[in-house]
Structures are given as C-alpha cells and as structure tokens.
Image (tube, rainbow, N blue to C red):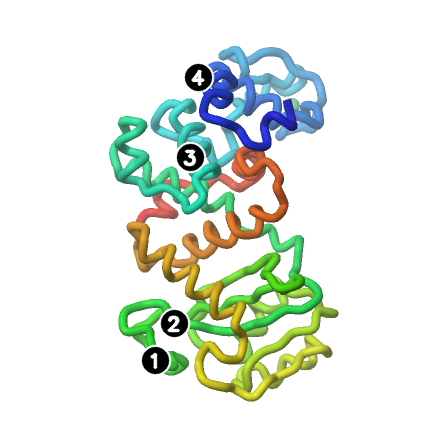
Amino acid sequence: MESKFKSLSIFEFQEMFPDEESCLQYLSDLKWSDGYKCKKCGHTHYCQGNRKYDRQCTRCNYKESPTSGTLFHKVKFSLLKAFWIIYYMSTSKKGISSTELSRKLQLRQKTAWLFQRKVKEAMKSSGKYPLEGNVVVDESVVGQQEEGVKGRKNNKKKLIVFAIENKGKGVSRLYGKVIPNAGAKELGEFMRSTISKDASVRTDGWTGYNPLVKDFPNLIQEKSKKKGKNFKQMHRVIMGFKGWLRGIHHHANHLQSYIDEYTYRFNRSFMKENIFENLIKKMILAEPVTYKMISP
Ligand SMILES: [Zn+2]
C-alpha cells in the first residue's frame, strides 16, 4: 500500500476512501498506530465507545473519538469532504483555491477556506529540520509597488525574510517568515529557529545581520549589489513565491500561512514522501485550532 500511496491517483483515493467510515477508520488507525493510551489516566486497555471507532478507557471510562484533540475536531461537514480537501491540497502542484474547492465539493466557499486554514496550520514547519550547508538569508517586501522599494523602513508593506539551502545548482529547501522589521532581534529569531549553527550563512551587508555572527560563526556578509544581483537563486525563489501568491486569491493578514503552505510544498517536492499521509498525520498530531482562532 505504501508505494502505491506515494502518487495517489484520484481513482486510488476514491477506492481507499469511498465513504465516511473509511475515513474514520483511517484516522483511528493512524491516531493509535503506536497503541492505545488513555489521555486521562494512561491506561492501555479500551473497549468500543458510543460509535464504532470511538475508544473508551476500561479503567476511567474516558471516551475519545478518532477526531478529538486533532485538527479534524468539530469540523462542521463530512469527514469525507475534509479528506478530499486534503487530497486536492496535497496533490495539486500550486495549491487550490477555496472557490474551486467549494465548487468541486459543494461546500460554501467560506467553509472550504476555513478548513484550508486548518490544513495550512498542519503545514507549519516543525522546526526539527534546520537548514544546513550553504544557506542564504535575505528579506523581501510583499505588497503593492514592491519593485524598487527597499522596504526596510516601509510600514505599509509586509516584510518577509527567507532562508534557502543550496545544494548543487539548485535550492533544496527553504523557510520564510513575516517580520515586523529587519532588526537583528527579528532576523536572529528567525535564523536560530530555521538554520543550523554550523551552516555557512551568507547575507547582504545590512547591519541587522552584523550581531548574528555570534550565533552563526560561519556567517559571511557580502557587499550589497543591485537588488537581485547578489543571490540569484534567492531572487528566483522570492519571484516564484510572489508569482504564486499573485495567482491565488489571498488575504494579506494571513501571509504567514501562505508562506507555510508554499514552503511545505516546496520542501516536500524533493523528499518524494507521501504528502497526503504526512499532512493527515500532522493534522492528528497538531493542537486543535478553533475557527475563532483563524478567522480574519
Ligand atoms: Zn482512563
């Protein structure tokens, strides 16, 4: 099943998930794949709860459903449709808009959009795999009239910092973050959470990077040249992200979640792992997010 799953076709998906029950069973298998343990008392024996896939602790009677405590918690439409959304989001190369999902799955656009936000929560980096080797860090501005605007003092635009990991002639992985300003504090926080200490980091001559040599002994600051001339690959990555952003219906307040989605997809395109299963796993492990927390 594992190898067939890697490039899950629409037919295989339909075969695996024909109905609500198959989704519940799948979630249940994944959630308790390391065995059952009661969340309240730690007991490891259970019996069936009220519904088929619910589990009830035989010591304290605590009941748990496959969806409780996960990002599937209290989803207001069928689990099958939720699986379809994840399927589309994980198999489409450039992502899929909530409008398109609403048409395909007969959901309200807003409903699809809100659930997509949850999936994007699951796409957030775990922070467990810092960039290594040759890394480049640079900032960029997202917003109107972005061309030619230096942006470091520009309050109307959103400032983003990107870090890319170079391998050979290409970019193997990247991370990005919306930052309020390009001060050493903000840049440092981002870099410490995404880049290995031993990496060879290159930045431009911006003073915000100066103090970070203490965190990254192999940091080299290059003299700033004209925009885009310093780090060609970085420039290409930023252009790619902005191009993608322009092509989707996006909401400026959620820029970080678009960065998370973009980098998640980018970083996994090289790993050739099963994105669909990985996403569902992350949704089970993630803390539940209420709609209130993610509404605009
Ligand atoms: Zn218990």
Q: Secondary structure at mark 1?
A: loop
Q: Position of residue 228 (x, y in %)?
A: 46, 77
Where is 191 relative to 124, above or below?
below
Report which residue position mark 1 lands on. Answer: 149
Q: Position of residue 184 (x, y in %)?
A: 55, 79
Looking at the image, do the residues carrying marks 3 and 1 touch, with CB atoms under 8 Å apart? no
- Whichever of callouts 1 and 4 sits on the residue coming sooner in the sequence is 4
Q: CA distance from mark 4 to mark 3?
A: 17 Å
Q: Is residue 143 left or right of residue 185?
A: left
At a point 45% along the width and 19% down the height, the residue shown is 14
Disc 2 Cβ-to-ligand 1 distance below 8 Å? no
Q: CA distance from mark 4 to mark 2?
A: 44 Å
At a point 52% along the width and 86% down the height, the residue shown is 224
- Whichever of callouts 3 and 2 sits on the residue coming sooner in the sequence is 3
Where is 65 relative to 217, above or below?
above
Report which residue position mark 3 lands on. Answer: 88
Where is 44 relative to 212, above or below?
above
Q: Which mark is residue 238?
A: none
Q: Which amino acid type is marked by label 4?
A: Glu
Q: Is residue 3 left or right of residue 287?
A: right
Report which residue position mark 4 lands on. Answer: 20
Q: Quadrant of the N terminus?
A: top right
Q: CA distance from mark 3 to mark 1?
A: 36 Å
Q: Secondary structure at mark 4?
A: helix
Q: CA distance from mark 3 to mark 2?
A: 29 Å
Looking at the image, do the residues carrying marks 4 and 2 touch, with CB atoms under 8 Å apart? no
Report which residue position mark 2 lands on. Answer: 141
Q: Position of residue 283 (x, y in %)?
A: 52, 37
Considering depth in this image, is 48 or 282 the residue closer to the camera? 282
- Whichever of callouts 4 and 2 sits on the residue coming sooner in the sequence is 4
